[in-house]
Amino acid sequence: MPIDPLSDAKIVDSWHKNAAPWTPAVRDSRIESRTLVTNRAILDAVLSRSPKSVLDIGCGEGWLVRALAERGINGTGVDVVPALIDAATSAGGGDFRVASYEQLASRELQLSADVVVANFSLIGKESVDALFRSAIWMLGLGGAMIVQTLHPLIACGEQPYTDGWRVGSWDGFGHGFSDPPPWYFRTLESWIQLFVQGGLAVLEVREPLHPISLKPASIIFVADTSG
């Protein structure tokens, strides 16, 4: 049966195909926005909570867990793509496991941490909705959920500012990529609603600026259970 080109299943299918070029793109600093802005931005956001433990959802090849390990923070990374988890495990620095968002949402892995972080990894629809409904169970006492994603006002482009699926692109990621994953666009209001529906209160919104364009390179939400 063909995969719906605008679906969560297609996102997973695309990442299985692109795990090989992704690892060197990250490790060789080929993605300009990450090198200039967003890697440091998400690291600073996590460190601002002074966690002892972190759960990285959609960890990819594991760079964030390794960066936190260098600062004495225990990290667990999960990703649905075995090739990415293999790359992360080979590099070391944390505990890496193959798991889908659906498995996390169902609490199959029974994972929890002081900070649950998702760095440009929440691009689906149903799987992300389910993850937020269960996010509170992954947080330790006083824990926080931190999400970095595309800034809605910038990522919207010329399309209507309404929730919906968008066609993906690998522009700016370097060579070797194919069949880009789609992504589900959410307005700022919709992002806030996700946190609220999950029992979380958004404490802080950060908008890291690109040093050349001086436009937001991303948006970062910091939320906890204080509400």
Image (cartoon, grey):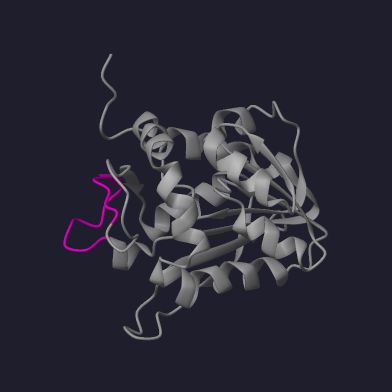
Left or right of 137 in this view: 85: left
Residue 23 can be seen, yes or no = yes
Residue depicted at x 59% and y 45% = 87
Q: Is residue 165 above or below residue 2?
A: below
**In this view of the protein, can residue 207 be seen by the observer?**
no
158 part of magenta stretch: yes
Residue 11 on the magenta segment: no
Placement of 68 over or under 58, stated as above or below:
below
- The location of residue 82, given as percent across then percent down, is 56, 33
Q: Is residue 218 left or right of residue 135?
A: left
User: Which image quadrant: the N terminus?
Assistant: top left
Point out the image quarter for the C terminus. Answer: bottom right
Q: Which residues are magenta?
A: 156-170
Q: Main secondary structure of the magenta part?
A: loop
Report the front residue among 56 and 88.
Answer: 88
Q: Quadrant of residue 45?
A: bottom right
Q: Residue at x 27, y 27 (%)?
A: 4
Quadrant of residue 30 within the rendered picture: bottom left
Residue 193: horizontal and vertical position, in percent? 48, 50
Q: Nearer the viewer, residue 192 or 106?
A: 106
Image location of residue 191, percent across then percent down: 45, 54
Residue at the extreme left: 158
Residue at left offset 52%, top offset 61%: 27
In front: 15, or 175? 175
